[in-house]
Image (cartoon, rainbow, N blue to C red):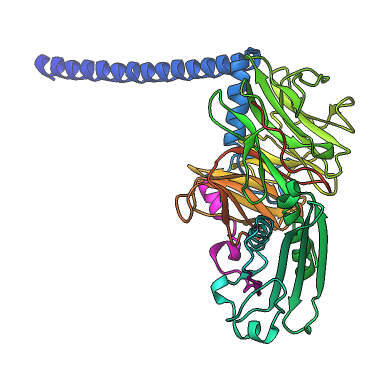
């Protein structure tokens, strides 16, 4: 081989060697950079976790608690502690696999048609009674209430008898006759009667009550509840109130509203940043709030000073059992939040080791549920058992004592929207109650267990606001345009004045 040829080959080999080394160095540089980025990411994550664990400022706790309360949304099945592997599906796909209740899509059962006997009376007590009862019958979801224009021709006076044959011809299956009048002593007499078309001319139910003038509205709800009971076998739940938090930023206050959306008013002072209301013994309202950027404390209606608790961390949630003989609270402990429970506020102990435990709720059978930290997202726990699948955000559990059995209802989140789902008391039999109608959250059950109230941002129908619907997802009806959070619903004790004092 000639010298030029040898030199040429040497040059080629040298260049190849140089390129190979360059390639190796380039790869090494890339790997080194990847390693550095990975280390930086690990260090950054460790720093965030470390800060999260060490940070004790009020701002951090409020941000964490509020973020969890808003973002914690999921759907129940019979999950266990062992299914915390990385979710195989996206949250949207998990939610899509939950069956939508047929009633929620408008294919519910046909409801019996009833009518409210019309009248020409114009006195205030009669008009109030009539409006309240008619509204409750429409909201209860058990009937189709005929319009006044469907009434048979005739002159409707207070003593006009009920012509069952004429009402049958217009499609009515039952008639409700009510009247209110002022008595000589200044009190008001409220009467109600129910007639069934095929049960003869005598009413199947009659009720009379004498009330003071300031109690006409709340007692009208009791008349409606009894009429619903006479026609369905279970009294209604409208002699009741809801409590919730309304407002944004620093202007968050605890509100109370009647079950039909009447008279919403704040009960917590304007200098408090309220988080979580609940009705306690004798329908007293409790809520958690921060004053002057201090920690969140527990307050009781009518008392300016907070309630002293042990432990003394910030309180992010409170719930009382059905008979108010048990209480549960979400209390900050170190860098986390845990659920405490006890027979009263003076005797509390840790209920569960689950961390970031929010929105406690008691079942009618005294089971305690809450939204707590899973490996991938907040989940719904009943006791220490998670009943919602990994991968979905779950929040705001509540229990409905339906005549067909106890159901758990809560919100689940995927993407931009949230929906309500229902399941058995301890999981299983999961169905969606809302679908593709904005964000629907913070459910609360009516005292009779047949209705669910919730806040919705939907733009269809009546638009955003406070809604009530049947437990099967059918017949949603807006009762107020207000959209808040942390909703609770409780029956008024007998003889209790409906309106809680409004805070200045």
Q: Say whether residue 239 is left or right of residue 480.
A: right
Q: Position of residue 223 (x, y in %)?
A: 76, 60
Tell me if I can see residue 405 in this picture: no
Q: Nearer the viewer, residue 318 or 428?
A: 318
Vertical comparison of 11 with 257: above or below: above
- Quarter holding the C terminus is top right
Q: Nearer the viewer, residue 2 or 65?
A: 65
Vertical comparison of 299 with 428: above or below: above
Q: Nearer the viewer, residue 413 or 456?
A: 456
Using the rendered view, name the quadrant where residue 503 is placed: top right
Using the rendered view, name the quadrant where residue 112 is placed: bottom right
Q: At 54% across and 19% down in the image, what residue appears?
A: 45
Q: Magenta region: which residues?
A: 91-119
Using the rendered view, name the quadrant where residue 280 is placed: top right
Q: Is residue 405 magenta-colored? A: no
Q: Position of residue 183 (x, y in %)?
A: 79, 57
Q: Nearer the viewer, residue 164 or 374?
A: 164
Q: At 73% across and 60% down in the image, what residue appears?
A: 181
Vertical comparison of 467 with 350: above or below: below
Tell me if I can see residue 290 in this picture: yes
């Amino acid at each position: 081989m000639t010298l030029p040829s040898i030199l040429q080959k040497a040059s080629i080999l040298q260049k190849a060697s140089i390129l190979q080394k360059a390639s190796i160095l380039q790869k090494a540089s890339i790997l080194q950079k990847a390693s550095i980025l990975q280390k930086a990411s690990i260090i950054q994550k460790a720093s965030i976790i470390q800060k999260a664990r060490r940070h004790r400022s009020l701002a951090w706790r409020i941000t964490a608690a509020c973020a969890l309360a808003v973002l914690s949304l999921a759907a129940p099945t019979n999950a266990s502690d062992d299914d915390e592997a990385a979710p195989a599906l996206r949250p949207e796909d998990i939610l899509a696999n939950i069956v939508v209740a047929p009633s929620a899509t408008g294919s519910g059962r046909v409801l019996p048609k009833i009518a409210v006997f019309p009248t020409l009376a114009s006195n205030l007590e009669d008009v109030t009674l009539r409006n309240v009862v008619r509204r409750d019958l429409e909201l209860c979801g058990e009937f189709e209430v005929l319009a006044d224009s469907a009434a048979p021709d005739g002159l409707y006076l207070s003593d006009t008898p009920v012509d069952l044959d004429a009402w049958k011809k217009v499609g009515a299956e039952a008639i409700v006759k009510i009247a209110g009048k002022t008595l000589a002593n200044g009190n008001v007499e409220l009467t109600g009667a129910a007639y069934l078309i095929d049960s003869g001319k005598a009413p199947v139910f009659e009720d009379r009550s004498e009330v003071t003038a300031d109690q006409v509205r709340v007692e009208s709800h009791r008349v409606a509840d009894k009429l619903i009971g006479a026609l369905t076998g279970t009294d209604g739940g409208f002699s009741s109130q809801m409590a919730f938090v309304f407002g944004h930023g620093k202007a968050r206050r605890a509100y109370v509203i009647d079950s039909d959306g009447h008279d919403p008013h704040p009960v917590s002072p304007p200098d408090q940043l309220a988080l979580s209301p609940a009705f306690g013994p004798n329908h007293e309202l409790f809520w958690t709030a921060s004053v002057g950027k201090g920690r969140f404390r527990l307050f009781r209606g009518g008392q300016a000073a907070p309630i002293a608790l042990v432990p003394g961390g910030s309180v992010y949630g409170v719930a009382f059992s059905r008979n108010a003989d048990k209480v549960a609270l979400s209390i900050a402990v170190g860098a986390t939040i845990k659920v405490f429970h006890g027979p009263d506020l003076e005797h509390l102990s840790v209920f569960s080791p689950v961390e970031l435990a929010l929105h406690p709720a008691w079942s009618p059978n005294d089971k305690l549920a809450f939204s707590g930290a899973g490996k991938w997202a907040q989940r719904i726990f009943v006791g220490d058992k998670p009943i919602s699948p990994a991968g979905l955000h779950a929040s705001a559990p509540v229990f409905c004592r339906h005549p067909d059995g106890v159901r758990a209802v809560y919100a689940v989140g995927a993407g931009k929207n949230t929906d309500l789902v229902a399941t058995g008391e301890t999981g299983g039999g999961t169905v969606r109650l809302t679908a593709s109608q904005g964000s629907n959250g913070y459910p609360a059950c009516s005292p009779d267990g047949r209705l669910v109230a919730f806040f919705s941002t939907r733009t269809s129908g009546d638009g955003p606001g406070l809604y009530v619907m049947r437990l099967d997802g059918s017949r949603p009806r807006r009762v107020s345009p207000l959209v808040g959070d942390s909703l609770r619903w409780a029956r008024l004790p007998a003889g209790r004045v409906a309106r809680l004092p409004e805070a200045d």
